[in-house]
Image (cartoon, grey):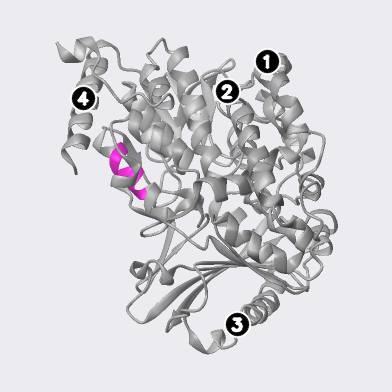
Amino acid sequence: MKSTSRNTLSVCVLRLVSKVVMSQKKVVVVGAGPGGLASAMQLAAGGCDVTILERRGQVGGRTSAIEIDGFRFDCGPTFFLYPRVLDEIFHSTGRDLMEEVPMERLDPQYRLTFGGGGQLDCTPDMDEMDRQIAQFSPQDVGQLKRYMDDNRIKLEKFRPILESPFHSALDVMKPSLLGAAKHLHPFRTLGKELERYFSDPRLVIAFAFQSKYLGMSPFNCPSLFSILSFLEYEYGVFHPIGGCSRVSEKMAEIAEEMGVKIRLNEPVDSIEMEGRRVRALHTQADRYDADAFVVNADFADWMTKTVPNASRKRWSDEQIAKKKFSCSTYMLYLGIEGLYEDLPHHSIHISSDYNRNLREIETDHILSQDPSVYVQNAGVTDPTLAPAGHSSLYVLVPVTHDTENVDWSKEAAGFRELTLDKLGELGLTDVRDRIRVEHQITPDDWQSDYSIYKGATFNLAHNLGQMLHKRPRNRFEELDGVYLVGGGTHPGSGLPVIYESSRISSRLLLQDLGMDTGFIDDSARGVPPRPEPTAVA
């Protein structure tokens, strides 16, 4: 580690020792996913005695690694976007993200192919994008730059909303939100927003498909989320060496260095309450009492399985069942003999009838015969993910969340064959002959093995009725001493906003315990870590 990083770490350690001597509060974090790990780091830096209870045998949750016979795959997210938030969290604990987890910015970011014809190699080079756009629709040349300019302003207005808690409907009247409304167009769909810039429907999809990061159709998703594709082009698409799972693993290592205790294979069996206040959590191994609890587990699954229904009104089992949930994903992880050197790091193939594909996922809840497919071919960037002369292919197909319309015990084998056929449209015509390792995850598996409600991998849907104060709140409104992080609370799904949820909830928790949050606030303002007076003395 560089000397500057060692110095800031020493400062952080001095500050932490000082806080421990003064007053150490106990916090238990449920779940070692990205939000739970980020929370643990910040709460430990704030002086708390932190324990993480993780039900599985490894850290990361949906950002964990799948390792088979020398092949390594990211379980879930493979795009690392907008590293600013996590970088600031690292700095608040005296670390540097890019030193701890080297990352490579990708160019092209990904290749888009369309079942109706056409291809885009998406790059942050605006002139090159215009050259490719001209081949689709000459009248749309220049529109991407206009879109970028508009969304630069939108992000500036949107950031205070993403970075602040929403405790009630009154918070919707905040000056920052009212002032941002004319830039955000909350009642316009993302698809309609993109149609203001592009006349070619393929280009609309090219800059709107990112709503799938939220598990939603761009034609149902609010236009607020046009910032997603903007973030890609403005700030880059990154690949952490070793995969996105390496970020979570490094966070766990840092957390343990800071004194956080991580208990693997310890699912919470029951909850101990006194009125509205949670006093302790029970596992088969132990009882864990604490001053506060952070829940990073899948919100709907954990609440319905762990907290007595009578203790919840707004988020009772019956109310949760009525909510709208995101889509799910069908996954194939393929260890391949040889390399696909002509296939980019990321490729997305858009269904020839994209609207129908979306309708089948979100409305009809059936399996499509012409699905869209995403493929990560990380070996062209990172040779550490497979044995020499081999490749790790990650294949994702958006599908309906668990529903009585689809019996995966009967459908999985046929859908696998359909998915492999679709890979042929990306040029992988010989993939079946080259498979040496294979692993599959269906929506049923997301539900049973990863404890995700309905197998909805992107959590509660992000419609206007389930955002801001209408989402489960960071300081959970039905249980005292409980705070939420992850995709099931504000701001929502996707790694950058999950990390932001950890910062919001950590700040609230520390404030409620009467502890300092200056180190969190300073890092968000770009102020380097500094010793506190007692630490210097």
Amino acid carrying label 2: it is: Ser
Q: Residue at x 62, y 49 (%)?
A: 229
Q: Main secondary structure of the magenta part?
A: helix
Task: Say if mark 4 contacts mark 3, CB within 8 Å.
Answer: no
Earlier residue among tags 2 and 1: 2
- Secondary element type, mark 3: loop
- Identify the secondary structure beneath mark 2: loop
Q: Are marks 2 and 1 in contact (CB under 8 Å)?
A: yes
Which callout, 4 or 3, points to the residue nearer the camera?
Answer: 3
Q: Which range is magenta? A: 249-255
Q: Secondary structure at mark 1?
A: loop
| Between 193 and 212, the one nearer to me in the picture | 193
| Numbered tag placed on residue 174 in the rendering | 1
| Amino acid of disc 4 | Val
Q: Which residue is mark 3?
A: 427
Q: Earlier in the sequence, mark 3 or mark 1?
A: 1
Residue denoted by label 2:
164
| Disc 4 and disc 2 in contact, CB within 8 angstroms | no
Quadrant, the N terminus: top left
Q: Which residue has dot 4 on it? A: 11
**Going from the N terminus, do you reach mark 4 or mark 3 first?**
4
Picture coordinates of residue 204, whole percent (x, y): 76, 55
Circle nearer the N terminus (2, 3): 2
**Residue at x 30% of width, y 17% of height:** 24
Locate residue 96 relative to residue 200 in the image: left or right.
left
